[in-house]
Amino acid sequence: MALAVFQIRVLLSAYLGSDSAGDMPVRQAAHLAYALHNEALATFEGRPADMQSAIQRIAKADEMLGGDLHRLFEQFLQATT
């Protein structure tokens, strides 16, 4: 899974940033993959994922892109803990 998230991040890297000309869902996917790839790698390496940090990174992308994905992850994290 970590390798898949990393590859998605690499494939979508051209869509990172506030000046990207890509469609909004593609830009959001790029930022989501970027925000989560370190946590996926940590899990793969047997370390705990820091989901609070990941949610903070997703929230920053949401601010830039006008999204609300971080709330979905917050709700999921609350429901599973």
Image: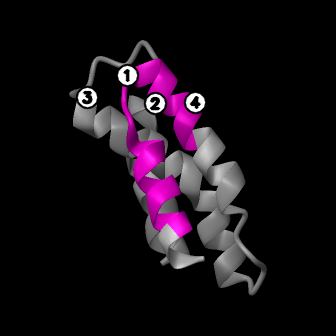
SS state under label 4: helix
* Residue 40 at least partly seen: yes
Q: In the displayed image of the protein, which residue is found farthest to the top?
A: 19
Which quarter of the rendered picture does the C terminus lie within? bottom right
Q: Is residue 70 above or below residue 78?
A: above
Labels 3, 2: front one: 2
Residue 20: image quadrant is: top left
Q: Which residue is mark 3?
A: 24
Labels 1, 3: front one: 1
The CA distance from mark 2 to mark 4 is: 5 Å
Which of the marked residues, 1 or 3, is nearer the chain's N terminus? 3
Residue 21: image quadrant is: top left
The local crowd at label 4, few if under 14, some if 14 to 19, many if 20 or more residues have their Cα within 10 Å, is: some
Give the magenta part as a residue range: 58-78
The residue at 49%/23% (across/down) is 63
Q: Which residue is mark 4?
A: 60
User: At which x and y percent is residue 65?
Assistant: 40, 23
Q: Which residue is mark 1?
A: 66
The local crowd at label 1, few if under 14, some if 14 to 19, many if 20 or more residues have their Cα within 10 Å, is: few
* Type of the residue with mark 4: Lys
- Report the side of 39 relative to 78 (left or right): right
User: At which x and y percent is residue 19?
Assistant: 42, 12
* Type of the residue with mark 2: Asp
The CA distance from mark 3 to mark 2 is: 11 Å
Which of the marked residues, 3 or 4, is nearer the chain's N terminus? 3
SS state under label 1: loop
SS state under label 2: helix
Q: Which residue is mark 2?
A: 62
C-beta proximity under 8 Å, tags 3 and 2: no
User: At which x and y percent is residue 33?
Assistant: 47, 52
The CA distance from mark 1 to mark 2 is: 5 Å
